[in-house]
Structures are given as C-alpha cells and as structure tokens.
Amino acid sequence: MKFGGTSVGSPARMKEVARLVTQGGEPVFVVLSAMSGTTNELVEMSNRLYKKNTEGAHEIIDNLEQKYLVHINELYSTEEYRHAMRLFLNERMNYLRSFTDDLFTSFEEKNIVAQGEILSTTMITNFLCEQGIKAALIPALDFMRTDKNAAPDQFYIKEKLATIMTRQHDKQVYITQGFICLNAYGEVDNLQRGGSDYTASLVGAALPADEIQIWTDIDGMHNNDPRVVENTAPVRQLHFEEASELAFFGAKILHPTCVQPASVAGIPIRLKNTMQPNAPGTIINNHLEHGKVKAVAAKDNIIAIRVESSRRLGSASFLRKVFEVFESYQTPVDMVATSEVGVSMTIENTNRLNDILDELGSYGSVSVERNMCIVCVVGDLNRNTLGNIALITTAIQRIPVRMISYGGSDYAISFLISQDDKAEALRSLSKVLFQNKES
Ligand code: ADP
Ligand code: ASP
Ligand code: MG
C-alpha cells in the first residue's frame, strides 16, 4: 500500500493511514511519500544553497521545524512518543542545517530532499507502535538501489528485501520510504519527483505482493485530466499497457515508469482514494476491454525538432545519425514522424538542447518549436477496431496538429499540438469520446 503526499499530509490523515493499513488483518508492506509540501520546501532550500543564500535556506528549515513540532503534538497521545519524535526531528533539522553554500552539488541536494520521506515514515511507524501495533521501519536505503544507468537494480532489490523480510517475519505492518534510494556509487539518490509510486511497484514485484495499491487523493484514474477538464469520470479498469501509456503521457496520478515492474510480475495495481476509501477506484491488470477508448492524458513542455535532409532520406544512415545525436546527449526521444525529406522528433529534457541542435545542423536544416504539448488518447486502438481513430481526429478537427504518432503500440495515438490549444483539445476529446458514456 503506497500513500502519497496528501494522504500523509496532516496528523489526521496519518491516523487514517494507520487505520487503513491495519484493517485487513493480513501483514502489509507500506510505502510512504513525504508530507505534502515538504519535498517542494526541501527543493527550494537546496535552490537557495545553490544561490549561496544560506540564511534563506535556514529560514525554510526553521519553518519546517515549527510545522513538524505542531504535527508531533497532535499526532501522539503520550509524552514518551512526543519526546522521542522531537529528538528525532531535532537531529534531522540539525543535519539539514549542516549544509552550507561552500560546496553545494546535486549530491548534497539529494541528501536534503531525502529527509521528507525519512520524517514521514518515522512519524507513522512510531504512531503505530504507540497504538500497540507490531510495526517495523525498513529503511529504503537498505534495499532500494539503482544501477549505473540510473535504473532500479531489480535483482539486488529482490535479494536484499528477501533477506530483510526473513529477519523481520513477525510484524503486522512494514513501512518504508518511497522515492529515495542509493545509486550505483552508494550515494543517496532518488527515483525522480513522484517516484514513490515507482518504489511501491518495485517493492510489490520484489516481495511479491498479491496486489499493489496506490492510495491518493482521487478515486482512481480519470478519463481525462481533472485539473483541466470538468466532469471527468473514474475509469474502473485499465490494461497494464493502457496505464503505462497514460502515466508516460502525463496522467500525474501515476509516476511515468511505475507500471512496468508490476506488469512484468503480473501483479495488479489498484488505485484508491484515501479520502473515500470505499470508492471502487481503478484496477490495472492484464484484461483488455475490446474496442474501448479509455482515457486521455497530456504532457506539457515538449520541444519539437525537425531535421530536413539536404539529400533524399533514401540515404540509409540518415536516421541512425540523427538518433545517435540524442543518444550521445542522453536525451530520450518521445515522438517521431518521418517523411521523404526529413524527420520530426520531440524531447522533454532540454539540458543538452543547444549541443543537440548544433550537431544536428551537420545533417540538414534544423527547426525547433517550444511550448508544445503531447495529447495522448488511450484504449484498445488495435487497427481492427475500426472507427475510433476517425472519432478521435474529428474531436480535434479545429486544432492545428504538428505531429501524429500511431502504430508504436496498439493502445495509444498521440498528437503534438501547441500548449495554448491543450485545454480546448482535452475538452473536445472528452465531449466526443466520453460524454453520456459509462466508463
Ligand atoms: P500523490 O501525492 O498521492 O502521489 P499526485 O498529486 O501525484 O498524488 O497524483 C494525484 C493527482 O493526479 C490528482 O489529484 C489529479 O489532480 C492528478 N491527475 C492528473 N491526471 C489524472 C487522471 N487522469 N486521473 C486522476 N488524477 C489525475
Ligand atoms: N516526495 C516526492 C515528491 O514529492 C516523491 C513522491 O511523493 O512520490 O516528488
Ligand atoms: Mg504522485
């Protein structure tokens, strides 16, 4: 069971988490995010240290400490636990204060942002113990590790976790930190923002669990982005591939890569709402509802790059050379479209954009468009399910489309449009695809 930031965002919410994890009677492994807002504060603290503003960084620590002191008073009922937790908080805050602007790199930043999950897991484990529940804190840094490519080392995670679990076999609730890990060099690192979902899926696959539950602040995956479109509805069931596409193309409820470990292990993922625990949520498994369009997602801040070859594309090595440029700058390409004269691609990561554009220049004329958005429609879009693609393109007929991608999978069609047109595109797709239809 994984609980996100809002789900552990206050002492009252933490008490509800304690209730939910103990109600089933079976042993449960729990993955927790930091309390909502905390990771952002820690990122901001690091930004201030990068800018040599130590005083500003300390201001953030002081405010955090005051907030957590209030939470501690509210969460525990005994002075014994309040005292123990205050000592722990004080030690963590002094650790944060030990960072200065002398030498501040991403190494220091990662140690700082890890503290949010370390605090929330310690608070809830202690609360469960205060309630007389057999709970154990299993530090993520003892088993969660990435390899030299920054990908989780699933073999290591499985081995380590198995050893830990045999030693700790008599507990009711096992708790660990989402998001944080060690990297291949043994340094504290993380699985990127929103990465606690990924931790949950990796742990669920490694144990293995019967089911992976992602508890958040909404009743499952909705058929469109609820932050942009009104009257979205929960989708009750998704195929692993459908959920992967939605997560990758911007449905924030799931971290982009978190479906993969569960899908490989064949373990269903259930999305549940902490605010309405009895709502059915969404189940993600191997079942595919034939011919059905399930949901729409969108991803902002996309850059489109077009390279037009001075020669005909018939030159067999043109595409290889173009893609090697992206590979050499470790920049993944999301969408691709080719024609006789050139190729268009999209990227999200702009860290090496200037180098990439410089090198691409030697293969043809290069143009760039920023502030683009990928809109992705997901469902059973197999070529034999006639009619869906026509319906989707009709829905966005008034919107200028820069690229289309279909055929990379049977579960998605993606369009590249300007970010300014996103809201209209999403609303129009909802109207045509889902209005007056049961999800
Ligand atoms: P947590 O802190 O629990 O990880 P997140 O904020 O990361 O929660 O994800 C939940 C949020 O994702 C929802 O509150 C909602 O605003 C947003 N969201 C975006 N697209 C979707 C979607 N298709 N279905 C459900 N929620 C979505
Ligand atoms: N606390 C981390 C974040 O805010 C990880 C997570 O919540 O999933 O990004
Ligand atoms: Mg999240």
Image (cartoon, rainbow, N blue to C red):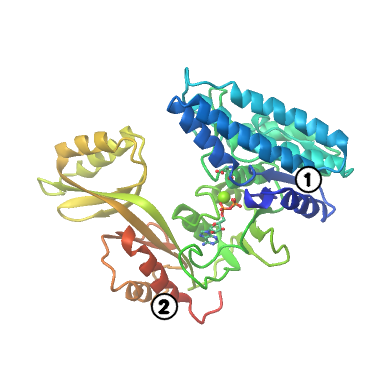
Quadrant hosting residue 366: top left
Vertical order, 105 against 358 (above or below): above
Identity of the residue furthest to the left in this view: 310
Percent position of residue 393, x then y: 33, 72
Where is 418 relative to 361, above or below? below
Instruction: Give the image quarter of residue 121.
Output: top right
Q: Position of residue 413 (x, y in %)?
A: 38, 63
- Indicate the quadrant of ligand 2 in the picture: top right
Q: Residues within 10 Å of mark 1 (few under 14, many from 20)?
A: few
**Seen in the image, is 366 located left or right of residue 385?**
left
Furthest-right residue in this view = 132
What residue is rendered at 70% in x and 64% in y?
Answer: 276
Q: Which mark's residue is nearer the viewer, 1 or 2? A: 1
- What's the amino acid at mark 1? Glu
At horizontal 42% and vertical 62% (from top left) the residue drawn is 412
Image coords of residue 212 (percent x, y): 67, 52
Left or right of 428? Residue 74 is right
Helix or strand or loop: what does disc 1 sit on?
helix
Q: Label 2: which residue?
A: 432
Q: Position of residue 98 (x, y in %)?
A: 59, 20
Q: Secondary structure at mark 2?
A: helix
Callout 2 environment at 10 Å: few (<14), some (14 to 19), or many (20+)?
Answer: some
Q: Which residue is mark 1?
A: 74
